[in-house]
Amino acid sequence: MRISELSAQTGVPVPTIKYYLREQLLPEGERSAPTQAAYGETHVQRLRVIRALIESGVSVAETRRVLDALNNPPENPHELLGAAHAAITPPVDGSLDLTSAQDVVAGLGWTPGMCDDAVLHDVARAMQGLERAGFEVPQETMPVYLRSMRDIADAEIAGVPTESAEAAVRYVVLGSVLVEPLLLALRRVAQQVASAERFGGVDEGGVDEDGIDEGGVGH
């Protein structure tokens, strides 16, 4: 197909496709003439991955790292998962103390060597943010977090495609980038539902007699 047809099929404007080609995010098509190239289904799939990542806030540099994982995938599926996560996780911060983070993730079944350093540093970074704000996750709540996260992870890993490295990386990366906002949104809805069930006083419009909505915010 021509670049105009690739654009029509994916919804990505031709100038944007040309930009991805210049940045070497999208592989060149098969040249049929000095100024013409033909594109196929591989380009369609790759373009959709690129577009999904960038529209989700992933930078061009991070997108290139994801594509490197697609182009040169590790043989071991577990290493493939680490490569995919590394593409969308902040780099290692050597100033962070990982002791508390390691104590917490042990509750997920973690032992040394099981996880990429970057994801452990991400946990430590988040815990540092809590500490600086003077907020502590209640002792009885953390085990619930860990059980819930492990259940989610088990279900997600069971669904990782095995037919190709590209399918696996696409599932892991897009699942992380696109599903994490959904998980956060569902958590907030669940909090408001739990709040309404605990504190009551919510009428059919979602606001109680004192003008407090089910999330506990006054108007």
Image (cartoon, rainbow, N blue to C red):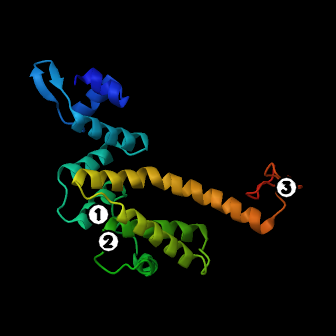
Give the mark nearer the N terminus: 1 vs 2.
1
- On the image, the x and y values in percent for residue 152 come to 46, 66
Q: Image quarter for residue 39? A: top left
Secondary structure under the numbered disc 2 in the rendered image? loop
Quadrant containing the N terminus is top left
Q: Which residue is mark 2?
A: 115
Secondary structure under the numbered disc 3 in the rendered image? loop
Q: Residues within 10 Å of mark 1 (few under 14, many from 20)?
A: many
Q: Which residue is mark 1?
A: 82
Give the mark nearer the N terminus: 3 vs 2.
2
**Does residue 184 show up?**
yes
Q: Which residue is mark 3?
A: 208
Q: Nearer the viewer, mark 1 or mark 3?
A: 3
Please state which amino acid type lies under the numbered disc 1.
Gly
Q: Image quarter for residue 22? A: top left
Q: Residue at x 25, y 61 (%)?
A: 80
Give the mark nearer the N terminus: 1 vs 3.
1
Closest to the observer: 28 or 40?
A: 40
Q: Residues within 10 Å of mark 2 (few under 14, many from 20)?
A: some
C-beta proximity under 8 Å, tags 1 and 2: yes
Q: Residues within 10 Å of mark 3 (few under 14, many from 20)?
A: some
Q: Nearer the viewer, mark 3 or mark 2?
A: 3
Secondary structure under the numbered disc 1 in the rendered image? helix
**Disc 1 to disc 3, C-alpha distance:** 47 Å
Please state which amino acid type lies under the numbered disc 2.
Cys
